[in-house]
Image: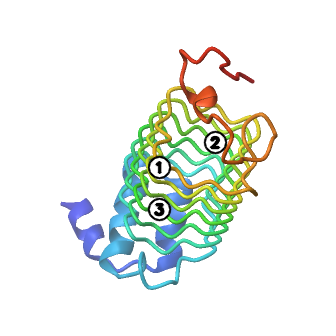
Amino acid sequence: MFRGLLNKIPQSKDALLRQIREGDNATALEAVERLREKGHLTDGSLQGIELPGANLQNVKLAKATLQGSNLREANLIGAYLGATFLEKANLEAVILQKANLCDVHLIHAKLTGADLREVHMAAANLQGADLGGVDLRQANMWGANVRGAYLTGANLLGANLDHVIFDDQTILPDGTYWSAEVDIQRFCNPQHPQLWSR
């Protein structure tokens, strides 16, 4: 009953963000739902928020506007970030295992050292993103845009790279630039006779 009364008390955006930063997973997810109800996820007022290390496992942030946000080392395992705007966001060392990032906007985002194993990021826009050392094993990157992306040291073993869009500014896991002559399967196909490994 007491908790029910607390739920009726209006909370400011700053108070809800503090709950996300400092609370456990259940508290953080409840605060996100409050932000959604208030329209803050999509009104642009959360651009540049500071949520490093937040416990946001299984959070639903579809279509949220979070450009320039700091989610460094956050736990986003199983999160749903479909069509979320994360341009220039700091996602260094973030854990995104088995998350859904279909159509996500990660233009010029920093994902250095992130764990994206088994992530679904079909049609994601990763143009100019820093994916150095990222673990993308078994990731579904079908149709993703990686033009100008930095993939040096990334682990793509078992990843689906069908229809991925590269350009001559894309830096591949071995530190070379992509070209039409590159056999991209040597980075992801474990049966490839010239399989590259870091």
| Residue ID for mark 1 | 163
| Residue ID for mark 3 | 104
In this view of the protein, which residue sits in the foreground, 64 or 2?
64
CA neighbours of label 1 inside 10 A, class few (<14), some (14 to 19), many (20+): few
**What is the distance, in whole Å, between disc 3 and disc 1 at their CAs?**
16 Å
Q: Say how the picture is coloured.
A: rainbow
Q: Secondary structure at mark 1?
A: loop
Q: Secondary structure at mark 3?
A: loop
Q: Which is in the foreground here, disc 2 or disc 3? A: 3
Q: Is residue 181 above or below residue 5?
A: above
Q: Which mark is residue 82?
A: none
In this view of the protein, which residue sits in the foreground, 28 or 115?
115
Which residue is at a point 48% across and 58% down the rendered structure image? 124
Quadrant of the rendering where the N terminus is positioned: bottom left
Report whether 28 appears left or right of 93: left
In this view of the protein, which residue sits in the foreground, 21 or 125?
125
Ranked by sequence position, the earlier of labels 3 and 1 is: 3
Q: Secondary structure at mark 2?
A: loop
Which residue is at a point 26% across and 60% down the rendered structure image? 3
Which residue is at a point 43% across and 54% down the rendered structure image? 101
What residue type is disc 1 on?
A: His
Ranked by sequence position, the earlier of labels 2 and 3 is: 3
What residue type is disc 2 on?
A: Ala
Q: Which mark is residue 114?
A: 2
Q: Residue furthest left?
A: 1
Q: Residue furthest right?
A: 175
CA neighbours of label 3 inside 10 A, class few (<14), some (14 to 19), many (20+): many
In this view of the protein, which residue sits in the foreground, 163 or 175?
163
